[in-house]
Amino acid sequence: MARFRSELLCIYEERGYIYQCTDPEGLDALAAAGPVTAYVGFDCTADSLHVGNLVSIMMLRWLQKTGHRPIALVGGGTTRVGDPSGKEETRRLLSDEEIEANKRGILRSLSKFLDFERGGALLVDNADWLDGLLYIPFLREYGRHLTINRMLTFESVRQRLEREQPLTFLEFNYMVMQAYDFLELARRHDCRLQMGGSDQWGNIVCGIELAHKADRRQLYGLTSPLITTASGAKMGKTAQGAVWLNEDRLSPFEYWQFWRNTEDADVGRFLRLFTELPLEEIARLERLEGAEINEAKKILAFEATRLCHGEEAARRAAEAARALFEGGAGEISALPVVEVPRARLEAGIPVVELFTKAGLTRSNSEARRLIRGGGARIDDLRIEDEQLVVTAEMLKNGQLKLSAGKKRHVLLRAA
């Protein structure tokens, strides 16, 4: 028998999105009674969201698909402070110009998954109300409802203090500001639910308590589990860095390849969390064993890439992978492209510099080690000489394929 009556909470539970909830029965009754407005906050710390944000984004997407209203809040105000949750050191403070550029990039990320035009999703910026607050009136009105004693019980604060890592007064105010965000969204948009990762539990609870004390409002909080791989690695992190959602930070092929490289034990869980495939189909794919599990990984890669970059980009990425790794006849044009000025190529570029410029290595010394280890290739031919100079005459049909190991490739083209 299902634990929940509402379609939304059933989906969240069946697919593995629920970790903590302040009042499961109350939230279920609310969602069963009619449309609920819920929000997730995204601080403007980069010009793209990444796979680490994807659980929260998918929760907003399912919210919209089941007839409720999602709010994506960008932290134009809170980014100026910096969220201490899950961090071991103070964040670098960004300029107003950096924050504005990051907001535009985050909107591009979110628009891949949410319909802000016809579907009723809202994009709001907490700078709209935080920037205009007067400090002393704000403290008198809301500071009296939030105690230091309560804040010190939350794990994100306690861990920093126990490790004797600095927690600035600026960061300590972040929890107050996020709590006020929830109250402001409740007043402006009748937002009843805040969602986020498990590291946001303390911030969410503070908002619920503030709304109850200030307005006698009944609000709800729901967190998702911290997603790690079967081997214990943090989800969305690779040796090359974050797995970005915007194609100017990470190509659709590299995104597809990230999902294709999922560990066997994670396939079923990731299909439930990061695709919209029916649960019956996921259960079938999850039962595959041996070499057949690779077909399930390709389906995961295709479905995840389709949601983020569209069906055509997913198809082209799959064809490029088939051509590269299975000897198929597919196009490799979906590979990430690095353009180099033709004049620079005609003058010649040392191969170690080229691999670093292409992002396949982080330094020239790393490129030399890659060559000495036999992992560097040009057009599938192993590079033997680390003093090699690449010139325009080496291009075939205007391009070269550079490879680092078996799974990382880029196309070099003359601009």
Image (cartoon, rainbow, N blue to C red):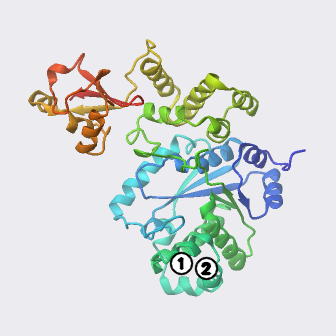
Q: Where is residue 372 drawn, in percent x and y?
A: 27, 34
In contact (CB < 8 Å): disc 1 and disc 2:
yes
Task: State the CA–CA distance, disc 1 to disc 2.
Answer: 9 Å
- Amino acid identity at mark 2: Leu
Residue under the point 26% across and 23% down: 400
Q: Where is residue 230 drawn, in percent x and y?
A: 61, 44
Residue 357 visible somewhere in the drawing: no
Residue under the point 58% across and 68% down: 181
Residue 395, placed above or below residue 252: above
- Amino acid identity at mark 1: Leu
Residue 384 position by quadrant:
top left
**Quadrant of the image for the N terminus?**
top right
Residue 76, placed above or below residue 295: below
Mark toward the start of the polypeptide (1 vs 2): 2
Q: Where is residue 392 drawn, in percent x and y?
A: 15, 23
Residue under the point 59% across and 72% down: 180
Residue bearing mark 2: 152
Q: What numbered label is drawn on residue 42?
A: none
216 or 403: nearer the viewer: 403
Residue bearing mark 1: 161
